[in-house]
Image (cartoon, coloured by chain):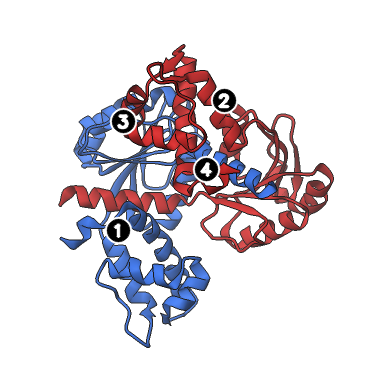
Chain colours: A blue, B red
Amino acid sequence: MKEKQISNAVIRRLPRYRRFLKELHRKGVEKISSKDLSKLIGYTASQIRQDLNNFGGFGQQGYGYSVANLHDEISGILGLDKDYKMVIVGYGRLGQAIASYISNNEPKFHIVGIFDVKQIIEDVEFKDAQIMTCGSLADFARKEKVDIAVITVPTEKAQLVADTAVRAGVKGIWNLTAVDLDLPDNVVVENVHMSDSLHALAYYMQKQEQ
Amino acid sequence: MKEKQISNAVIRRLPRYRRFLKELHRKGVEKISSKDLSKLIGYTASQIRQDLNNFGGFGQQGYGYSVANLHDEISGILGLDKDYKMVIVGYGRLGQAIASYISNNEPKFHIVGIFDVKQIIEDVEFKDAQIMTCGSLADFARKEKVDIAVITVPTEKAQLVADTAVRAGVKGIWNLTAVDLDLPDNVVVENVHMSDSLHALAYYMQKQEQ
């Protein structure tokens, strides 16, 4: 398939395109030129056309892009036309914030189970998802055929939790801890390293001052 | 200065180098070759040498890199040898998680003020930082010469909060909301878009299955 050759850089830009298109759609905008999209999104019009041409291009000369179509096409490319079963492991403040965010904003990602240590789970609840101790993670993930484990446990527990999830058949790890995980090649890991982003901010602030 | 020409891609890798070096240092490792660093960090040895040569290179032929030196050099490049005054605007679960994370892991970033609506701030506290209503943000930021505003308010309030902070002299915005902000060129914005990361995860999981 042609899509296989698309660079990581392009893939990384797609969620951003989709985000702006979703907002345009919400505002009732039906079509948009690459030029107007450029003003909005901050990439050049030429970059936008080139990016979208990777997927066959969805625009028509002199008309622009259909906002709804382009949004749906990008959703399809990203795999957001499917549903994912998700567990959240670590239900401290970050885990709770993430659970609430996903539940309100990400309809294709279904939180089916939440795991933490006993002291924490006794005080919390979450809509339809069961809340369990971490000891139940393996059995639960296997039985429910969980696709994604979101990891927000303390750093020293992260690798153990990831290993457990992977042995139970989980194919994607969304890692919100500060450590990098060592996992088999057939498992996809996506890291959100808060500090990396903060340090890049510091760098660019310093450059701005010079 | 030579550093000015360094690509964003290299800059984005530096926090990752630093993170691994910090961990090596914690473990008592004093020196490391680009080859061993490569195994650990997942970039090729050649990529590592090339990246670090951008800054003059800190390695010695046949010796490798001094872990502590390289860590400190990268910290300096990133601007982490300075101190930053920071406010957190939005003190829901995400704001609380971030405040706790920064306070425990980022000694150069000092949370001096926390802002939210009245109902929320009545129930919370946070170490040495004052907790105030958002109405006090402008005066406080100006008086305290705040460097960075961390924004975790609901999306529809994000632009207003950012504008207020910028008018009060804030030079860096760490944006943890789902919207992109429109700000003057002399203000540095760093976004953590949770969904973008989640959607990239979905993409790579789908590719893995094919």
> Tags 4 and 1 in contact by the CB under 8 Å rule?
no
Residue underneath mark 3: A162
Q: Are marks 4 and 1 on the same chain?
A: yes
| Of callouts 3 and 4, the N-terminal one | 3
Q: Nearer the viewer, residue B37 or A172?
A: B37
**Label 4 crowd bin: few (<14), some (14–19), many (20+), radius 10 Å:** some
Residue underneath mark 1: A78
- Determine the CA span between mark 3 and mark 4: 23 Å
- Determine the CA span between mark 3 and mark 2: 31 Å
| Left or right of A188 on screen, residue A95 | right
Q: What is the secondary structure assignment of the residue under circle 1?
A: helix
**Label 2 crowd bin: few (<14), some (14–19), many (20+), radius 10 Å:** some
Q: Are marks 3 and 4 on the same chain?
A: yes
Image-quadrant location for residue A76: bottom left
> Tags 1 and 3 in contact by the CB under 8 Å rule?
no
Residue underneath mark 4: A197
> Tags 3 and 2 in contact by the CB under 8 Å rule?
no
Could you tell me which chain the residue with mark 2 belongs to? B
Q: What is the secondary structure assignment of the residue under circle 2?
A: helix
User: Mark 1: which amino acid?
Assistant: Leu
A175 up-or-down from A47: above or below: above
| Of callouts 4 and 1, the N-terminal one | 1
Question: In the drawing, what numbered circle is on residue B72?
Answer: 2
User: Mark 3: which amino acid?
Assistant: Ala
Quadrant in which the N terminus of chain B is drawn: top right
> Tags 2 and 1 in contact by the CB under 8 Å rule?
no
- Confirm whether residue A63 shows in the render: yes
| Of callouts 1 and 3, the N-terminal one | 1
> Tags 3 and 4 in contact by the CB under 8 Å rule?
no
Between marks 2 and 4 in the image, the one whose residue lies nearer the viewer: 2
| Left or right of B184 on screen, residue B98 | left
- Determine the CA span between mark 2 and mark 4: 18 Å
